[in-house]
């Protein structure tokens, strides 16, 4: 009688199949790390797998799996490992590998809206983006791309939140965050420290990404301190917190200047004046910033600096 194999990615781990056991039971019996936050009772999605090969050898979804799959909008090739048995050669990928992934799938976004009227504030604005992001997307499967970006934003978001920052918006390959929303007097220092922490956390993230896809990310950061208008825009469920004004545009241009200057982390003169006693800087530049008149002085922050 032919012995069928369950192949588990990442790692191409091959396990003999027991047609009476679920994918989760089979993995755990073989000492393969397989998340199952609810204990394998179809009350969470942490054990889910993406079916790469062998869809025809899966059992149909039972009622428990149907209920959760419908609630979360699973496609046909996403199955709960705790509820699925197989009777042929099947290859699967685990998108949830560790505690960080479990927190991501379990977390719920907090409502951070403040006002629909608008308020003028002086904030430090941080833009961050991923270098060569387009090439990465062209070589990644859609489900890999979504999973990796969710993890990336979770890890980088923790660095922002640790330093009292607020992520305002995401732009596919980057995000905008602000510091000083609670009128912290040292918001420029908090913004720069957040950027340094992001580079530190990137090392661990890249170890994970290399195991997952054999690739790594490089990031660029730009920070400017200035006056903005803060308010809630949109209506009903589509409303969101926003920051607007010339300072936001300049912070975005500073981030973009990294590419031309072959740097990773730049701040404006107004930010530099507030942090120069706390952080070590490298080169400084006088540049024309796209969309802005005159030259602007920018300062390179050394990512090994500590506050």
Image (cartoon, rainbow, N blue to C red):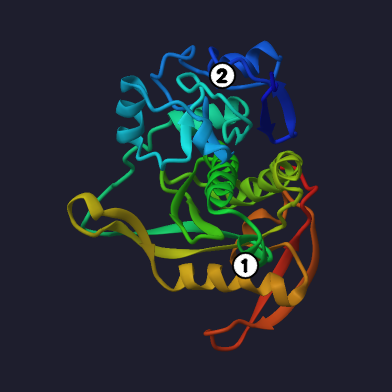
Query: From the viewer's perspective, is residue 299 above or below residue 157?
Result: below
* Numbered label attached to residue 24: 2
Query: Which corner quadrant holds the N terminus?
Result: top right
Residue 8 found in image quarter: top right
Q: Earlier in the sequence, mark 2 or mark 1?
A: 2
Query: From the viewer's perspective, is residue 165 above or below residue 98?
Result: below
The residue under the point 59% across, 25% down is: 99
Residue 212 percent across, percent down from the top left: 70, 42
Give the side of residue 69 with respect to residue 173, left or right: left
Residue 75 found in image quarter: top left
Does any portion of residue 206 appear in the rendered image? Answer: yes
The residue under the point 42% across, 23% down is: 44
Residue 226 percent across, percent down from the top left: 49, 65
The residue under the point 59% across, 53% down is: 141
Q: Secondary structure at mark 2?
A: helix
Residue under label 1 = 134
Residue 229 percent across, percent down from the top left: 34, 63
Does any portion of residue 126 appear in the rendered image? Answer: no
Query: Which corner quadrant holds the C terminus?
Result: top right
Q: Are marks 2 and 1 in contact (CB under 8 Å)?
A: no
Residue 23 percent across, percent down from the top left: 56, 21
Q: Secondary structure at mark 1?
A: helix
Give the side of residue 39 with respect to residue 145, left or right: left
Give the side of residue 56 with respect to residue 283, left or right: left
């Amino acid at each position: 009688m032919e012995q069928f194999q369950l192949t588990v990615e990442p790692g191409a781990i091959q396990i003999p199949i027991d047609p009476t056991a679920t994918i989760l039971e089979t993995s755990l019996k073989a000492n393969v790390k397989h998340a199952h936050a609810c204990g394998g009772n179809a009350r969470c999605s942490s054990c889910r797998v993406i079916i790469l090969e062998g869809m025809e050898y899966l059992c149909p979804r039972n009622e428990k799996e149907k209920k959760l799959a419908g609630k979360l909008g699973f496609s046909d090739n996403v199955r709960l490992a705790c509820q699925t048995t197989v009777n042929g050669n099947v290859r699967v990928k685990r998108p949830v590998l560790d505690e960080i992934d479990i927190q991501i799938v379990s977390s719920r976004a907090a409502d951070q809206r403040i006002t629909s009227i608008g308020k003028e504030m002086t904030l430090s604005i941080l833009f961050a983006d991923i270098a060569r992001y387009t090439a990465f997307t062209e070589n990644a499967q859609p489900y890999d791309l979504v999973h990796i970006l969710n993890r990336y934003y979770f890890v980088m978001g923790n660095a922002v939140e640790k330093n009292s920052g607020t992520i305002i918006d995401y732009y596919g390959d980057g995000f905008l965050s602000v510091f000083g929303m609670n009128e912290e007097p040292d918001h420029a220092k908090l913004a720069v420290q957040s950027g340094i922490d992001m580079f530190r956390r990137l090392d661990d993230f890249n170890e994970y990404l290399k195991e997952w896809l054999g690739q790594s990310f490089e990031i660029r950061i730009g920070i400017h301190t200035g006056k903005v208008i803060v308010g809630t825009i949109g209506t009903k469920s589509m409303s969101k917190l926003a920051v607007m004004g010339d300072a936001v545009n300049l912070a975005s241009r500073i981030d973009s200047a990294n590419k031309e200057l072959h740097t990773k982390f730049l701040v404006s003169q107004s930010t530099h004046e507030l942090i120069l006693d706390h952080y070590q800087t490298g080169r400084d530049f006088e540049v024309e910033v796209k969309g802005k008149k005159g030259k602007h002085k920018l300062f390179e922050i050394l990512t090994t600096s500590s506050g």
